[in-house]
Amino acid sequence: MKDITVIFVTWNRRQELLTTVGAFLHFVQYDHSKLHLHIADDNSPQPYIFDVIREFPNYHWTYSVTNRLGWGANVNLAISEAKTDYIYLNEDDYVAQSPINLKDGVRVLENVSNIGCIRYNHLIGHLGMQLRVEETMDAFGIVHYLRILKKESTFPYVYSNRPHLQHRRFWETYGKYPEGRKLGSTEEIYMSIVKGSIGPDVAILYNGTIDYLHIGKTNQLSTNDIGE
């Protein structure tokens, strides 16, 4: 079983992050000893990194801090410091409500080299997305997945910043996330890069995405939304 770095992206949401981490650890379907938990904080005004670590002491924790440089720089630093090929990304206000099947996600990414990312949340509303059912086989049997067809899909959101598992080849192929941009712009630019470039595809597991409860007050388009 492969090691996974689980990056929790946060800024100024202590209680939300505690709730999000607790839900992830409750619902994740993976050997917990293979999970490397990482807090990516964009310099919260009241630091709480060690509060979270103390709340969940039986795990391997690391952290990184950027100085109010925005989502892109915060996540780029965390991924660059990760020691694993597999990275699960979860913002601090997306709380899992059902099992997170990382086992099959890793199986797909391990066996299908031209897929680089597994989305776990929010396909509803992404109209124009075209999917193709595929399968791969390993020592554990067959796993089915749905490949998102980039060229055929008319909706731009092939990729999304919402909870997902990616292989390092995904980030290395498409490059770092845009820095110095607001939250929405960061995601929109990156999704356009993914959709318009040659590189590993995005997929979802055959049983679909899972429910996450979106909690907390959004910082998007507020004075706290750093960048242009």
Image: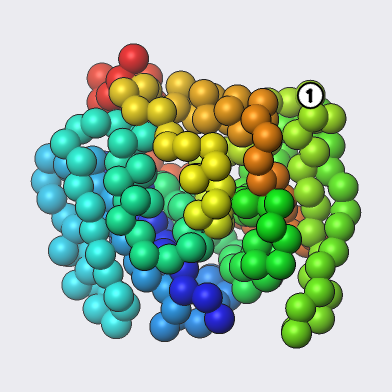
Q: Residue furthest left?
A: 46
Q: Quadrant of residue 219?
A: top left
Q: Is residue 77 above or below residue 103?
A: above
Q: Residue furthest right?
A: 133
Q: Quadrant of the C terminus?
A: top left
Q: Nearer the viewer, residue 106 or 204?
A: 106
Point out residue 153 in the picture as x, y percentages from the top left corner. Answer: 80, 30
Q: Nearer the viewer, residue 215 or 132?
A: 132
Residue for point 42% across, 83% down: 33
Q: Amino acid at mark 1?
A: Thr
Q: Secondary structure at mark 1?
A: loop
Point out residue 211 in the picture as x, y percentages from the top left corner. Answer: 62, 54
Would residue 82 be seen by someone viewing this image from the given angle? yes
Residue for point 45% across, 52% down: 90
Would residue 15 be seen by someone viewing this image from the given angle? no
Q: Quadrant of the N terminus?
A: bottom right
Residue marked by disc 1? 154
**How is the protein colored in the picture?**
rainbow
Residue for point 41% across, 28% down: 178
Q: Is residue 96 above or below residue 30?
A: above
**Crowd rating for badge 1 (residues with CA inside 10 Å; few <14, some 14–19, many 20+):** some
Q: Residue furthest top?
A: 228
Point out residue 125 in the picture as x, y percentages from the top left corner. Answer: 71, 32
41 relative to 167 in the view: left or right: left
